[in-house]
Image (cartoon, rainbow, N blue to C red):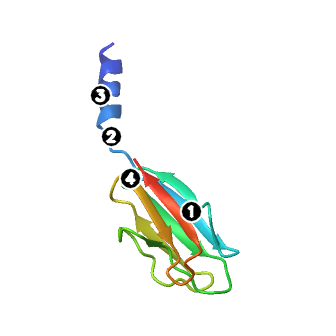
Amino acid sequence: MRTMLVLALLALAMPAYAANHAVQIKGMKFNPSKVSVAVGDTITFTNADPMTHTATALDGSFDTGQLATGKSAKVKITAAGAHPFHCAIHSSMKGTVTAK
């Protein structure tokens, strides 16, 4: 009984690890275009298109900068809520990150 209690307390005391999510940019679209994450998670945006793109949050919470073909950038989500984003070069490309 005592061992189980100690193990339970240790499990609760262990830090939670942030997850990494992947978004591919291809065909002038973000795939997936809607991403659900936890605060503290990261998202890796990878450009598989033959042209340069960005992933830029409308609220300014993240920006990959310009990603050439084959390049990636990792952003950390630091606030809860919906974070709509777009490509700053091609405004028709849109997505949303929702963080809890």
How many marks on residues? Answer: 4
Mark 3 or mark 4: which comes first in sequence?
3
| Of marks 2 and 1, the one in the foreground | 1
For label 4, the residue is 81
Residue type, mark 1 in image: Ala
Residue 96: horizontal and vertical position, in percent?
Answer: 50, 60
Q: Nearer the viewer, mark 1 or mark 3?
A: 1
Name the kind of residue labelled 3 in the image: Leu
Query: Tag 4, which secondary structure?
Result: strand
* Amino acid at dot 2: Met
- Image coordinates for residue 27, horizontal then vertical, percent: 70, 75
Q: Which mark is residue 55?
A: none
Name the one closer to the observer, 16 or 88: 88
Residue 94: x and y, percent? 56, 68
Q: From mark 3 to mark 2, how far is it between C-alphas?
A: 9 Å
Which numbered marker is on residue 22? 1
Of the two numbered discs 2 and 1 on the same chain, state the one appearing first in sequence. Answer: 2
Q: Give the distance between the C-alpha atoms of the residues marked 3 and 4, in whole angstroms.
A: 31 Å
Q: Which residue is mark 3?
A: 9
From the viewer's perspective, is residue 41 above or below residue 25? above
Lower position in the chain sequence, tag 3 or tag 2: 3
Residue 57's quadrant in the figure? bottom left
Task: Give how far apart the Cα atoms at labels 4 and 1 are.
Answer: 19 Å
From the image, tell me which residue sits under label 2. 14
Q: Earlier in the sequence, mark 2 or mark 4?
A: 2
Where residue 82 sits: x, y (%)?
42, 55
Which is more foreground, mark 2 or mark 4?
4
Determine crowd level at label 1: few under 14, some 14-19, many 20+ residues with C-alpha closer than 10 A.
some
